Amino acid sequence: MAVTTQQLIQWKQQQRPIVALTAWNYTTGRLLDAAGVDLILVGDTLAVILGYETTLPVTLEQMIHHASSVRRGVKRALLVVDLPFLTYQESIQQAMHSAGRVLKETGAQAVKLEGGNPAMLETVARLVQAGIPVLGHIGLTPQSIHQVGLKQQGKTQEAGKRILEEAIALEQAGAFSIVLEHIPSELAAQITQKLTIPTIGIGAGSYCDGQVLVTSDLLGLSERQPPFAKVYANLSEIITQAVQSYAVEVREHKFPLE
Ligand code: KIV
C-alpha cells in the first residue's frame, strides 16, 4: 500500500517511527523504496550531489528533472520534493506556481519548504488550501546558511521558544509533518509532544516521530559529514576499490578474459 500523509499521522498516534531518506535519481529511489523507506525526499541537498558547496544554487528545473527520475523508481514511499531557494519566498503566487509545477511535472505527493516566519505560514496555508500537502522544515534551515551558518539552533530558552511556536503555527497552517533539523533533543521532544502531526528529526535526537538522513551521508559518499550523520556503509571505499581492481585487470590484460 502506498504511504499517504494521513498514514504518517496515524503512525505517530501508534508510535510507529517513520523512516525517511533522500534520493536523487531513479536508482536511489528504487533501492530506498524496495528497502522499505516510508518517505523519500528529493532534497535540495541534490545541490551537493551536483557538486555545489551549498543548497542555494540548485534550480527548480533541476529539482523537477531529478524528482521525475526518482518518481519512476518509487512505488510505495511518500515522495516529497524540496522547493529550492528563492522559488517560494518571493510571494504566495511564486510558491503556488513552483509547488504546482513540482506536483504536476514530477508526480510527487508533497513539497517541503523551509521556515516558520509569518509570511511562510501564510504561504503554507495557501498551498494547503489549494490541495498541495506541505512538509515544514525548521530549526537549522540550510537555505539561510549565510545568516545562520550550519550550527545547532534553538540552544537558548528564547530561541527554543521561537522554534516551538513556529512548529505549532506550521501545524495550524496545515503542514502534514515537520522536519526538525539540528536542534537540542529536549526541544525536539517538547515539540513532538505538543503536535498532533509527526516530527521528523535530523540531528534532533531520538524523541522525534521519525528520522531522516541525507542518503549520501549514510552511504559514505559525502566529502563532508554533518556531526549527527551516521555512516552505515562506506561506498566511497567500495567504489574506489572496485574501480582500481578493474583498472588493474584492464592494464594487465586480465579483463575481459578472451
Ligand atoms: O535537502 C535535504 O536533504 C533536506 C534534509 C536535510 C532533510 O532537507
Image (cartoon, rainbow, N blue to C red):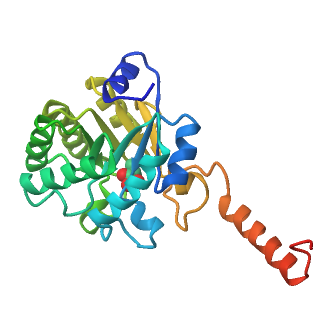
Tell me which corner region of the image, top left, top right, bottom left or bottom right, holds residue 87: bottom left
The residue most toward the bottom is 251
Residue 15: horizontal and vertical position, in percent? Answer: 43, 19
Toward the viewer: 191 or 238?
Answer: 238
Residue in the picture at 14% in, 58% down? 89
Q: Taking 243 as reference, is 156 left or right?
A: left
Q: Taking 32 as reference, is 56 left or right?
A: left
Q: Is residue 256 above or below residue 171?
A: below
Quadrant housing the N terminus? top left
Residue 79: horizontal and vertical position, in percent? Answer: 38, 42
Residue in the picture at 55% in, 53% down? 27
Q: Is residue 235 above or below residue 246?
A: above
Q: Taking 235 as reference, is 160 left or right?
A: left
Quadrant housing the C terminus? bottom right
Tell me which corner region of the image, top left, top right, bottom left or bottom right, holds residue 3: top left
Residue 212: horizontal and vertical position, in percent? Answer: 45, 43
Residue in the picture at 14% in, 54% down? 97
Toward the viewer: 109 or 220?
Answer: 109
Residue 153: horizontal and vertical position, in percent? Answer: 31, 51
Toward the viewer: 28 or 198?
Answer: 28
Q: Taking 205 as reference, is 250 left or right?
A: right
The residue most toward the top is 14
The residue most toward the front is 258
Residue 204 seen in render: no
Residue 83 seen in render: yes
